[in-house]
């Protein structure tokens, strides 16, 4: 579960490593985003659990984003639609970055190789459920932004009932946040009790 963190050799700086072909050779199986995170953040987390720094950072960022989504829904209730759109879209795009840098690489390395044989184990089941629901919420959010903020989609793909779609997304995002907390517990707290 814990990964070796030293990836930069004495003869290469982080920048040289990122620009060289040796980047892939240093950590086979890691994505570029995860290697960047590994290069710049310490191995130990800051919340006092068994988590890595990036897992702790992701947890805090996700909770803050959840609160921002609630604040964004309050903006919509007060008919401040432009601010609502900026708030929700910012959270959606920040989450996309967190997925790419932290969650997807962790899932690829720690969960995907064990599927489907170990799906019955809590460690893998929680992460898989969180990943499926999270991907659904992110895709739905991107669809809502495409409909609400652009004219890219043809008219027959656009929805009319804004409240229903956005409330569904907020509810789904809340469930995803809860499954993320359960995943964090299963990965970084329960194993050390």
Image: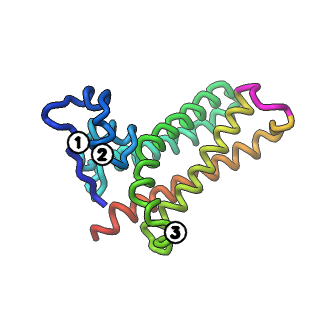
In percent of the image, x 42 and y 48: which residue is there?
105
- The location of residue 23, given as percent across then percent down, is 30, 36
- The residue range painted magenta reads 150-155
Q: Nearer the viewer, residue 1 or 166?
A: 1
In percent of the image, x 40 and y 52: which residue is there?
106
Cα distance in 3D space between marks 3 and 2: 25 Å
Element at badge 3?
Answer: loop
Element at badge 1?
Answer: loop
Q: Which residue is mark 2?
A: 27
Looking at the image, is mark 3 or mark 2 earlier in the sequence?
2
Q: Is the C-beta separation of discs 1 and 2 under 8 Å?
A: yes
Looking at the image, is mark 1 or mark 2 earlier in the sequence?
1
Which dot marks residue 7?
1
Residue, far bottom: 120
Q: Is the C-beta separation of discs 3 and 2 under 8 Å?
A: no
Q: Which residue is mark 3?
A: 116
The N terminus - image quarter: bottom left
Quick one: label 1, few (<14), some, or many (20+) residues within 10 Å? some
Residue, far right: 156
- The location of residue 88, given as percent across then percent down, is 60, 35
Q: Nearer the viewer, residue 151 or 181?
A: 151
SS assignment for the magenta stretch, majority: loop
Which dot marks residue 125?
none
Cα distance in 3D space between marks 1 and 2: 7 Å
């Amino acid at each position: 579960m814990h990964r070796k963190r030293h990836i930069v050799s004495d003869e290469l700086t982080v920048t040289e490593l990122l620009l060289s072909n040796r980047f892939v050779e240093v950590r086979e199986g890691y994505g570029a985003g995860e290697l960047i995170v590994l290069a710049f953040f310490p191995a130990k987390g800051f919340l006092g659990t068994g988590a890595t720094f990036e897992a702790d950072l992701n947890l805090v960022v996700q909770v803050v984003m959840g609160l921002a989504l609630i604040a964004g829904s309050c903006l919509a209730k007060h008919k401040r639609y432009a601010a609502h759109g900026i708030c929700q879209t910012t959270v959606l795009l920040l989450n996309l970055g967190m997925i790419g840098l932290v969650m997807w690489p962790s899932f690829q390395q720690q969960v995907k190789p064990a599927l489907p044989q170990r799906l019955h184990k809590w460690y893998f089941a929680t992460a898989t459920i969180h990943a499926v629901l999270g991907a659904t919420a992110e895709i739905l959010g991107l669809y809502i932004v495409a409909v609400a903020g652009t004219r890219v989609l043809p008219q027959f793909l656009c929805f009319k009932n804004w409240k229903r779609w956005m409330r569904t997304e907020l509810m789904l995002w809340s469930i995803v946040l809860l499954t993320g907390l359960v995943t964090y517990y299963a990965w970084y707290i329960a194993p050390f009790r």
